[in-house]
Amino acid sequence: MLVVKGSMLGLGSWDNRISSYANYTDWPVCFTLAPGLDPRQGAVHAYPSQGSFDESATPELDNAVSSLDLGPEADWFCGSESRYPAFQWDNAPRHRPAATTALGAFGDMNGDGYADLVSRNKFGQLWVSHGHGSAGQDLLAGSGWNGMAQLVRHGDYDGDGKEDLYARDKAGNLWLYPGRGDATFGKRVQAGSGWNSMREISAAGDLTGDGRADLLAADGTGSLWTFPGNGKGGFGARVKTGSGWKAMNALVGAGDMNADRRADLVARDTAGRLWLYPGDGKGSFGTRRLIGKSGWNSVTGLAGVGDVTGDGRPDLVAHAPGSHSLRVYPGTGASDGGLKAPKDLAGLPSDVLAF
């Protein structure tokens, strides 16, 4: 007998040996025929709490189960929107206009001209889900990513023209994962240490106007720092950009929100208001503008992932409160950097980080 108390990516010696089960918990369970809970390889519908089956009732699971999800959202995982994430947009071909310097290759993981979504689920798996140009194609890019305290991306940082990813581990080391242009990553390179002194890190694009993507970071005292990229995956000496940033609980490198060909910053304050800090192209920001009056503390996972609507303007995404939905907040490209009304972009469990 195998006693299970939570989700299992692999069943060990019990892999492909289960012929019956009894669930005595209050959670539903989802059985997957493939290891790693890979929903593309035959996720089977969920079974309720306080339930059971044997091979005669469910022959397709007889000695076929390789992984299982046991938890409050397991039934949703097994549903029709079981991929990470399940996009809800239409698939009309909509190549965005040519990118500006501030936008670069921002958001495009596989070089098809469309912004993609990267997500980490509760099992530490990293998924890349492609947009309009590659609809329905989700790639499991790796596992073990729960060891990372923060994940950020915003275009090319090592000079090869491909979207890269930075990860800060729990020891405070910063790692560059160079993108290969096919939604996978090359061998990681350590880009620094001691980054636990930074409360929040944001990949913000080219803030200094030198054609190289930079990082922003806010430390525990409320100081904001620019780390100018060197075009090789590393950074020059940091420059203090401002103070008083303790009032902000989210920093988003959103791209060129006001169409002035400069990278901007979006920040959420502790009162739930959303602000645009327009970049000046010299490593600093102009006068901030209010783009969200209230209520933004109710959304989680606020991120900038490039142009997901196909109109050439960068957008924001965030988890909708109280739902299995990731919403897109389309950018207007207006001088005030405002946003249009949100719409559902993808089905996504609430415990998945999307960026």
Image: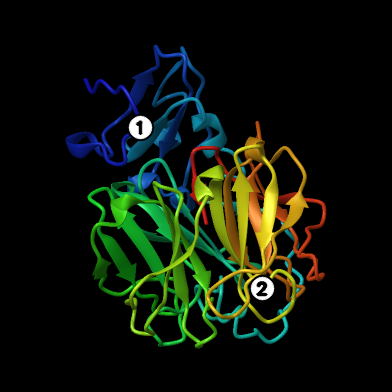
Element type where label 1 sits in the image: loop
**Which residue lies under the disc numbered 1?**
7
Q: Considering depth in this image, is 154 or 71 the residue closer to the camera?
A: 154
Mark 2 Cα-neighbour bin, 10 Å: few <14, some 14–19, many ≥20: many
Q: Nearer the viewer, residue 169 or 163?
A: 169
Which residue was labeled with disc 2? 256
Which of the marked residues, 1 or 2, is nearer the chain's N terminus? 1
x then y, percent, for residue 199: 40, 48
Q: Quadrant of the N terminus?
A: top left
The location of residue 45, given as percent across then percent down, is 53, 34
Instruction: Tell me the number on the disc at residue 180.
Output: none
Answer whether residue 88 is visible to the viewer in this image.
no
Residue visible at 51% across and 87% down in the picture: 211
The answer to whether residue 112 is left or right of residue 56 is: right
Height in image: 291 above or below 121?
Answer: below
Vertical side of 39 occupied by 110: above or below = below
* Residue 234 x, y percent position in the rendering: 32, 77
**CB contact under 8 Å: marks 1 and 2:** no
From the viewer's perspective, is 65 left or right of 163?
Answer: left
Write the residue at 39% across / 75% down. 179
Residue 79 coordinates in the image, percent (x, y): 58, 38
State the SS at label 2: loop
Occupied quadrant, residue 9: top left
Tell which tag, 1 or 2, sits nearer the viewer: 2
